[in-house]
Image (spheres, rainbow, N blue to C red):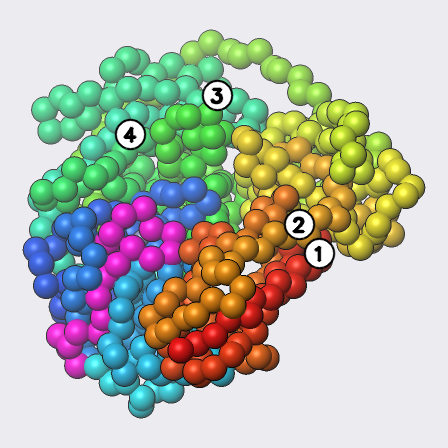
Amino acid sequence: MRKPFFFFISSLLAALITTAQPTQRSSDLMYPLLIKPKLNASFGKMRPNHFHMGLDLSTEAKENLPVQAPADGYIARIKIESGGFGRAIYINHPNGTTTVYAHMNRFLPAVETYLEKKQYEQESWKIDLSVPAGLFRVKRGQIIGYSGNTGSSEGPHLHFELRDTKTEHCLNPLTNGISVEDHVSPEPKQLAFYDYDKSIYEQVPMLIALIKKGDSYVPASPIDLPFEKVAVGIVASDRSDGSYNPNGIYRALLKQGEQKLAGFTLENISYDFTRNINGHIDYVHRYKGGNYIQLLHRPKFFQEDIYAGFAGKSFLLNTNNIERYEIHIADAHQNTSVIAFSIRKSGSQIKKIWSGQPIVYSQKNTYQVDGIKFHFSPDAFYDGFHMQVLTIASNDFEEKSKSYQVQPDYIPVNSSFRVSIQSSQSNLDTSKLLIRKTIKHKIEIKKAVYDGFGFSAMFRELGAFQLIEDRESPLVQFNLQKGALVKSGTLISITVSDNNKSIKSFEARCNGKWLMFKPTGTRYQYQVDDHLPIGEHLLTAVVVDEAGNKTVAQLPFKRL
Ligand SMILES: [Zn+2]
């Protein structure tokens, strides 16, 4: 009878593990800042095209706060980029986790020296550096650098991530050892109901406001739904003690009695998956200016799983009886709010006929009309819709095709797709063609390459597409006059502009030797240091735009 006994114990353990906090990796992490812990943004907070993958720790609107290692480890990676994380440092810990610190200013002097040496070796300011394990060991509580506002940051703060080193999945730091005072329960605001038989993109949700009554939240009005297969969404936010920023919730669970019917938990998210947020939310509602509605039911097409344990449970069955449900929403500290509601089937609805070509989720789709062709892979869409393309003639000299306007343009695309456009003209410089995509006045430019049908490029968003020709080279301007005299500390600045605002590469060399110019917007700057010897120099800047137009600009000067 040994086997059944062990089987019983192991199932009991499995049950305990799944109901307890998942992936408890590092039980006691030191808070990375030396000030009172305060959150600006939580893990899983909803952002355009991604979940927030870490915590935004308040630096009280200041820069240059010391940042300390929360546990022993070693510096494993340094990443420098003008957008994204800006200046970021990664520390590996012996328990198999990595902590990440982004938007930083200075690192330790020895690290800065090592980094600059590598940037000069690789002749690139932008760098993603793996650091050998033994090189920079850090102790718990040791200062590793100073916070800042570098990269895509909208104000001084520390972006902190906790990752599984091997898989690079981001873990919720609040359930894995980082503590922030939190006694505030999440606040549900609205319920949203959808007809599962229809595409989420081809209906408007039935929105029900919630009011607090006693210990729970209840609908402000009865919920009569004219459809049978009901998918449920929720608008809810959370905050921690002393913070007024509305953050995301950690978990939502839909229950009928003791039976768990649907729900999600934001505990473990990978960068490969994070764009699936566009399927997790009612994307169209948000696009049109509404709140983030999070779906409790797994979308029709979805990658990985924040809906663990609820595979295939995509809707509630709505009968003529009154059914009672509860939704439990919790933050990472298990502060919980309960929504109690009932639904009833009532009335029927009119079926709307949609025009356009049906695009089917989980399937390869091609769409071709006139002189344009789209290729969508099976993982492109979270739900189906009907696609149309409006054609607008063009007269502009640089425009080499009609403008093709996809309708609707607000359908989120999960994976990149190929757009191929035929030109309406014959006198083309085929090496200088671009595809311009416009959506909500936002422009994206890609180099176009001939693919047998037309000139094509990859995109990840719908909108209006047009083939354009670009023969104009970028403009390059120095802040110094020819023959200028410079000394240690002098700032040499090169301003770059382009007709299509699409600079592909920038490089500056002095007498053939690479010099590290740092980008800030459209300006590249270098402060004269030991990399530039005393004497006469010829500075050569080479700037190339997306179409391949190249400008070479030169500045003779003298270093004193
Ligand atoms: Zn952040």
Residue 450 numbered tag: none
How busy is the neighbourhood of tag 4: few (under 14 within 10 Å), some, or many (20 plus)? some
Q: Picture quarter containing residue 221?
A: top left
Q: Amino acid at mark 2?
A: Lys
Element marked by disc 1: loop
Give the mark toward the camera: 3 or 2: 2
Q: Is residue 462 visible?
A: no
- Left or right of 336 on screen, residue 95: right
Residue 325 numbered tag: 4
Part of the protein shown in magenta = 139-162
The residue that mark 1 highlights is 549
Q: Amino acid at mark 1?
A: Asn
Q: Is residue 407 magenta?
A: no
The residue that mark 2 highlights is 446
The residue that mark 3 highlights is 204
Q: Amino acid at mark 4?
A: Tyr
Q: Nearer the viewer, residue 480 or 259?
A: 480
Q: Give the Cα separation between the discs numbered 1 and 2.
A: 14 Å
The answer to whether marks 1 and 2 mark residues whose Cβ atoms lie closer than 8 Å is no
Give how far across and how far down residue 494 sits, in percent: 50, 59
**N-term mark: 1 or 3:** 3
In the displayed structure, 293 sits above or below 40; it is: above
In the displayed structure, 55 sits above or below 403; it is: below
Give how far across and how far down residue 362 sits, in percent: 63, 46
Q: Picture quarter containing residue 442?
A: top right
Give the mark toward the camera: 1 or 4: 1
Q: Nearer the viewer, residue 336 or 368?
A: 368
Q: Give the Cα separation between the discs numbered 3 and 2.
A: 34 Å
